[in-house]
Image: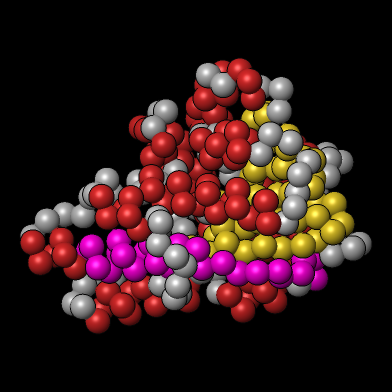
Amino acid sequence: MKEEIKKFWDERAKHYASSPSATTEDIFLRELEIHTIIQTIHGINLHGGHLLDIGCGDGYSTLRIAEAIPTLSFLGLDYSENMIKIAHERLEACPELKHRIRFIVGDVAELKQVCNNMFFDLVVTDRCLINLESTEAQFQAISEIAAHIKPDSYYIAIENFIEGHNNMNNARHSVGLPEIPIRWHNLYFKEHEFVHNIERFFKVLEFKDFSSSYYFATRVIYAKMCQMRGEEPNYNHEIHQIAVKLPWTGQFSPIKLVVLKRKAV
């Protein structure tokens, strides 16, 4: 299963090449994620140090965050060689960032092999752990992440949770839309299991339902409009541009941002 998921991302990297759509068709969702990560980093007052971006994909988000926060240095890590190849190409086009960013091939399940004894001031995962093949693999990966974060430093996790996914589908059902299934290569967290398994390593500072309004507007309201008109939804439709500016409300998205602080060892 793990190799099939890795192959999926390798093929996707080939198909989308340098497009921002390499990690998701919904490029406005990706912009919302980037904006929220940057906002969160400013909120924890992290003005310097080393950031590890695990599952960095094609490096698009890493570079955007680096541009916004010039006091941080970055290590981008992904197990897809094709994704990292594109990340290197992106970095070559941004020479002003090359002294602060490095991209390498590596697996979140085997961080010690690539990070050795490196410790980071901040680790970020963005829809990374949901691509692991089992719950056991997910929480083993979290323990690997914890082993490379300095005490009292931070882990920002954007991952998918089943509760928000179900809420979204219930809203779709209420207006006569079919449910959106979980993709074959994804394994969503349950919030209570997530908190239970990470609390020996981290203190949970905040759950952010940052994409709830966006999902309600695009996956419920816009999707119903398309159904009524007999049209296929289009990720480039203007409603996506509007929805990213909506204030956060409700719990209608599977995607949440969790701010975690490493407990003292």
> Eyeballing the image, is 37 above or below 94?
below
Q: Indicate how the structure is coloured in the image.
A: secondary structure
Residue 180 pos. (x, y %): 31, 66
Residue 15 pos. (x, y %): 35, 32
At 67% from the left and 62% from the top, the residue drawn is 259
Residue 58 pos. (x, y %): 51, 34
> Eyeballing the image, is 129 above or below 207?
above
Q: Quadrant of residue 139?
A: bottom right
In the image, 205: left or right of 211?
right
Report if residue 141 is visible in the image. Answer: no
Quadrant housing the C terminus: bottom right
Report if residue 6 is visible in the image. Answer: yes
At 80% from the left and 71% from the top, the residue drawn is 200
In the image, 115: left or right of 43?
right
In the image, 159: left or right of 41?
left
Residue 28 pos. (x, y %): 38, 48
| Total count of labels | 0
At 25% from the left and 78% from the top, the residue drawn is 173
Tell me if residue 214 is in the magenta stretch.
yes
> Eyeballing the image, is 58 above or below 265?
above
At 71% from the left and 69% from the top, the residue drawn is 205
Q: Quadrant of residue 215?
A: bottom left
Residue closer to the observer: 46 or 163 = 46
Q: Which region of the structure is painted magenta?
A: 200-223
Q: Quadrant of residue 221?
A: bottom left
Tell me if residue 88 is in the magenta stretch.
no
